[in-house]
Image (cartoon, rainbow, N blue to C red):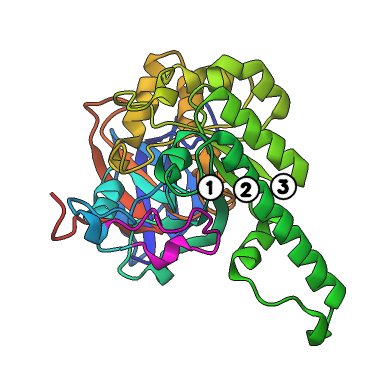
Amino acid sequence: MDTLLIKGGLIHDAVNETPYIADILAVGGKITKIQPDINPEEGTSVVDAKGLYIYPGLVDAHSHIGLDGYGIGFEGSDFNEMNDILTPHLRAIDAINPMDVTLNQAALGGVTTVATGPGSSNVLGGTFTAIKLSGLRIDNMILKEKVAMKCAFGENPKRCYKDKNNFSRMSTAAKLREMLFQAMEYRDKLISAGDDLSKKPAFNMKLEALLPVLNREIPLKAHAHRADDIFTAIRIAKEFKVKLTIEHCTEGHLIVDELAKENIPVAVGPSLGHATKYELRNKSFTTPGILAKAGLSVSIITDSPVIPQQYLAMCAGLAVKSGMEPFEALKAITINPAKHIGIEERVGTLEVGKDADIVLADGEIFESLTNVVKTFIDGNPVEPSLTTH
């Protein structure tokens, strides 16, 4: 679909708090006009959106979609490497399965862009990537290949490697520090060697993968639930002068004043479901609202497949039910996660020049009875795959 015109819907653009009725024109996958009464030219595909609610394509800043197969055991589970606690050289794009039904389910539910990558078993897990949820070949779906380097604190590295080499939180922090120190030394040697190949250090793929972190091109994406783990992540990021995002931030509401001082982006969730481990005992849907009121940039996440990706808007609705301002909740599943993963120039709002990722719904996106009528990714309608059910 080269030219798309969506007419007469109520636009919630994630820029203006008050929605408004207008038309949206998209050409070549980009939004070119948002204004009332746009006349279609010949060959334009026109969608009548009168009575419908229009939203930007939803964005999830933290998931493992495509790396953990739907209804599949070990054969389709590729989001954790369990043979090495330090794997910064792993890349999500080498394991994402575009044919996994969950991607199509998510898109039909209004989610158009996700950051997906390794899980939290390892102290360093590898590189997250941002993708659009439409396509057959991952190479054609990538929005930004490197968005963050996954690291993990708390119970997961302890539990997964307690019989190998990681029994305490002290060990987790020490291993991360050691890798960052080694990467700094490796970088300094590369710089000193210049063009003299004889002086260059031996190639080390793990240390190479950490150079974008040390050069502040991508952040450490720190899995941290408990308050003390959040502070450990901040301490190490400051020590090495690297960028940081806090992922999960389960006890963030308990330390909101301290987090407000740091002003680090936070991704909150998955907040739905049973507290399956000790460090989740304080999880609550009040957390995103409390952090947003303190001025933090808050993203709401599903951690898919923990919560199925298509229920991202429902999670935002539960945050609203627990006190979050509706406009802040909308930003938490659109522009804030886009900023969180560094793709806000392309997605996250309905504005001229941005990708034509557009969601049409028959009611407020937060309401559980609302249906997504149609999702467009790059101006193209998302259709159910043969395996979607």
Tell me if I can see residue 79 in this picture: yes
Residue 81 part of the magenta segment: yes
Q: Secondary structure at mark 1?
A: loop
Residue interval drawn in magenta: 77-96
Closer to the chain start, of discs 3 and 2, is 2
Tell me which corner region of the image, top left, top right, bottom left or bottom right, holds residue 303.
top left
Q: Secondary structure at mark 3?
A: loop
Q: CA distance from mark 1 to mark 3?
A: 16 Å
Q: Work out whether residue 142 or residue 194 is closer to the camera in this orientation and state it.
A: 194
Where does the image place residue 108, in percent across and percent down from the top left?
Answer: 26, 47
Where does the image place residue 122, in percent across and percent down from the top left?
Answer: 48, 49
User: Pointer 2 and pointer 1: residues touching (CB < 8 Å)?
Assistant: yes
Which residue bears the numbered disc 2?
Answer: 176
Closer to the chain start, of discs 2 and 1, is 1
Where does the image place residue 351, in percent across and percent down from the top left?
Answer: 53, 46
Which residue bears the numbered disc 3?
Answer: 242
Residue shown at 57% from the left, 52% from the top: 148
Q: Amino acid at mark 3?
A: Val
Tell me which corner region of the image, top left, top right, bottom left or bottom right, holds residue 370.
top left
User: Pointer 1 and pointer 3: residues touching (CB < 8 Å)?
Assistant: no
Q: Amino acid at mark 2?
A: Leu
Q: CA distance from mark 3 to mark 2?
A: 13 Å
Q: Residues within 10 Å of mark 1 (few under 14, many from 20)?
A: many
Residue 10 part of the magenta segment: no
Residue shown at 56% from the left, 15% from the top: 254
Which residue bears the numbered disc 1?
Answer: 123
Residue 383 in the image: above or below residue 119 = below
